[in-house]
Amino acid sequence: MAQRTAIPYSGARRTRRRGWAGVGFLAPALLLIGLFTVYPAFSALWLSLHAEAPFSGESVWVGVRNYEDLLKDREFHSSLLTTLYFTLLTVPVSIAGGLLSAVLLHRSLPGIRVYRVLLFLPVAVPTATAAIAWRWLYHPSVGYINYALGSLGLPPVSWLQDPSIALAALAMAVAWQNLGLNAILLLAGLQSVPEELIEAARLDGASPMRIFRSITLPLLTPTLYFASIVGVIHAMTTFGPIHLLTQGGPASATQVAVYRIYTEGFINFRFGYATAQAVILFVVILGFTILQSRLERRVHYQ
């Protein structure tokens, strides 16, 4: 009997050792997540329940008053709508452009690797450099875009100075910088499509468009799903191009939620109120992510 009970005891002890070894391997990652994700999140939530005293600068407990003020803040509501419009302008364009680029680059042509590297270069360009380049392109008098319009006999456009088109111009600049990443992701998805399925469809007489619509596109849905989630999160948290190109103007036309948070916190020094806005923005992004996760049922995993 002693020999029979020694086997499960030894197995249980070995399992516990492996468990503690796993915890030891995970400890550095868990420590970093706790320090740089969990702790800042709870600190932000705590700070959103405070306000700064007018003269001393000390934080005073106000409870949910900051959130009550946000319900009446029309400028914050407008910034959320601007963020939504900016996301709707940026994400579809960057994904559609990335898909078109991936299809064109999914060919065995001489020097195709060079074109793939050139397409990915905008992702590696620093935000400040890209913003300077787009400011030059959008310049109302010496910009290349207005120069091209002038050569076609069209009047110049104030791309970043006109409130009616400034947000769209800014969205195109951000979509251009994200297009390369989406193209690389979708190109990897295209390369994972089984060639035997494509050849079988060709033998059955299917046209290239039918093959793409019925075979390639359904098998690309996992990559498209991932690109859409990453794109929405990135668009809703974009700050650098807006700060460098428009500073939220003209006439608050490009004042998205992130830039308003920056204004309230680092210009008006209302840190508690700005943090409350950041918490609301986090909830909005979380809601969109959950909504997108409902679409995963339409994703075709191999």
Image: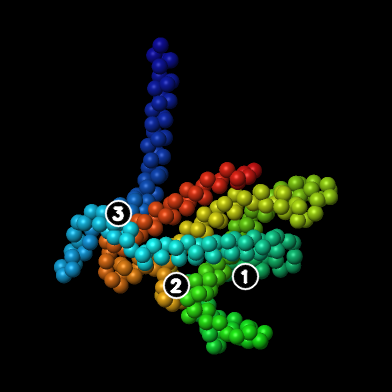
Q: Quadrant of the N terminus?
A: top left
**Amino acid type at mark 3:** Leu
Q: Select label 3 or label 2 by which is in front.
A: 2
Considering every residue shown, the one lying at the far top of the view is 1
**Amino acid type at mark 2:** Ala
Residue corresponding to mark 2: 253
Give the tally of numbered discs: 3
Q: Residue, x 45% and y 72% (percent of image)?
A: 253
Residue 173, quarter of picture: bottom right
- Name the secondary structure under disc 2: loop
Q: Select label 1 or label 3 by which is in front.
A: 3
Q: Answer yes or no: do the residues labelled 3 and 2 have beta carbons within 8 Å?
A: no
Residue 118's label in the rendered image is 1
Residue 52: % across, % down: 21, 64
86 vs 188, left or right, is left
Residue 50's label in the rendered image is none
Residue 130: % across, % down: 51, 74
Q: CA distance from mark 3 to mark 2?
A: 29 Å
Q: CA distance from mark 2 to mark 1?
A: 33 Å
**Amino acid type at mark 1:** Leu
Q: Is residue 208 above or below residue 127?
A: above
**N-term mark: 3 or 2:** 3
Q: Toward the viewer: 175 or 102?
A: 175
Q: Residue, x 57% and y 43% (percent of image)?
A: 297
* Viewer can see residue 164: yes
Q: Residue, x 42% and y 35% (percent of image)?
A: 18
Q: Answer yes or no: do the residues labelled 1 and 3 have beta carbons within 8 Å?
A: no
- Name the secondary structure under disc 3: helix
242 vs 120, left or right, is left
Residue corresponding to mark 3: 45
**N-term mark: 1 or 3:** 3
